[in-house]
Amino acid sequence: MIEQNTTSDLRDENPTTSSKKLLSTPIALIQLIVFSAIGLVMFFVPFTIGEKSTILFDHGATYLVTQQHTLSVTLLFLLMLYGVSKPFIDGSWHKNITHMVMTAFKIMGLILAVMYVADVAPAFMMEKDMLPFLFEKLALPVGMIVPIGALILAFLVGFGLLEMVGVLMQPIMKPIWKTPGSSAIDAVASFVGSYSIGLLITNRVYLQKQYSAREAIIIATGFSTVSAAFMVIVAKTLKLMEFWNVFFWSTLVITFIVTAITARIPPISLFDDHVERPALDHKGGTRLAAAFDLGLSTSRRATDLKQILWSNFRDGLTMAAAIVPSIIAVGLTGLLLAKYTPVFDALGLLLYPFTWLGGLPEPLIAAKGMSAGLAEMFLPALLLSEADILTRYVAGVISISSVLFFSAMIPCVLATEIPVSVGKMIIIWFERVVLSILLAAAFGQLAMYFNWIG
């Protein structure tokens, strides 16, 4: 059976892909092929420019940060001002305690950025591995890459490729990940788009009573990763861009293997799995034909290229504005805690047996760095950026596959109607990190043996 009504409903509710007037089939087919190819090339084909090999939009962001530094700093401050003011404009800052705390961190991040640029921050904050690193090596690239990456993502998600992949993945979703076939759209949207897009879809479908509580939690905590654009930041920080395709695809596979395992163990396995799903329409014929039909149908609705590009770019700007100031504040807090307190040493002791079992050269240091990912997903990359290649690779995978972190993802889940508590999300985070360490360490050593990385 080819499940279609859920994905079609979601597609039809999206103003960027709906129109009263449809494109002709030949034009839609050309659009599907050409624009999808552009997205795939821009995201997955490395080009060498100036002796540096990386994907195209990373070249563009790097040019802004390095060659147009004053412009990029100006744009970054405009983003942060928007990110800080938005909670007060829409009134969300006092929605609950989590929003209040995150708004406070955003304000703190803007203040710290001003102190850094004005060179008035305390000496311990101005050490090269503190504010200078956070601002120059993290905030600036994130501020430039995320909006540009969101713009490029429009070619992957706006013209039918996403829906095609979703239909083709349907037969394996239920037996492997314990979720209905239509959740393939959530999984792909989250991984190539953003966790906010994935959570929006998941919450909507859960409220429509087409996901059980367990299914919604599996999707929210297992598929809602940071976007591919954020993965570029992680790879750049850990000096893994030379091996971008190996890093990207192995991280995707490891993330989804971990999700398949955590779906079968407590606490997720203990959640209610009852749902009275309405009967789903389906078309006859082969699955490949059904995937093609859905992709083509989506492409026919994609009549306004400017609106699709602007909508994705706007979402990227909003996301960058929200996360950049909190990255600086939460990142500095995490770095200070890691450097001057035993907080992550204690948490790292819980991960130490697994980093040791994975054969990492300095297992205790690796465990400490990876434990910091609970506060902010970038911290493992920040703390382990000078480690050996195996540890850097595993840290990169952990940053993505752990999924849950306090600076953004956990508050986003709490803002939905998905019934999972903070305590259970911390347990799920720990399970995901342990499994990710073991799987990434094993693959990393294999990749080093075959010179895929190194």
Image (spheres, rainbow, N blue to C red):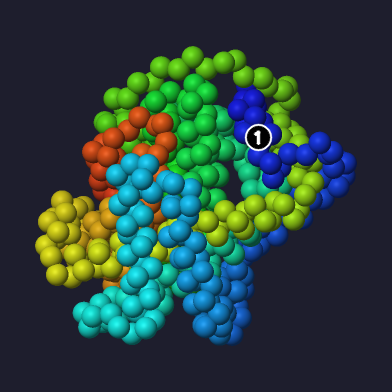
- Residue holding disc 1: 13
Determine whether, in the image, residue 434 is placed left or right of residue 151. left
Nearer-the-camera pick, 446 or 85: 85
Q: Residue at x 33, y 85 (%)?
A: 119
Where does residue 263 sit, x and y in percent of width and height?
A: 36, 33
Q: Amino acid at mark 1?
A: Glu
On-image quarter of the C terminus: bottom left
Q: Name the secondary structure under disc 1.
A: helix
On-image quarter of the N terminus: top right
Sort mark 1 into few (<14), some (14-19) or many (20+) by Cα contacts within 10 Å. few
Determine whether, in the image, residue 423 is placed left or right of residue 165. left
Where does residue 72 sit, x and y in percent of width and height?
A: 53, 77
Q: Residue at x 32, y 59 (%)?
A: 105
Where does residue 193 sit, x and y in percent of width and height?
A: 55, 50
Q: Residue at x 66, y 31 (%)?
A: 8
Q: Is residue 453 visible?
A: no
Nearer-the-camera pick, 350 or 334: 334
Residue 150 lies in quadrant:
bottom right
Q: Is residue 215 visible?
A: yes
Q: Residue at x 36, y 62 (%)?
A: 107
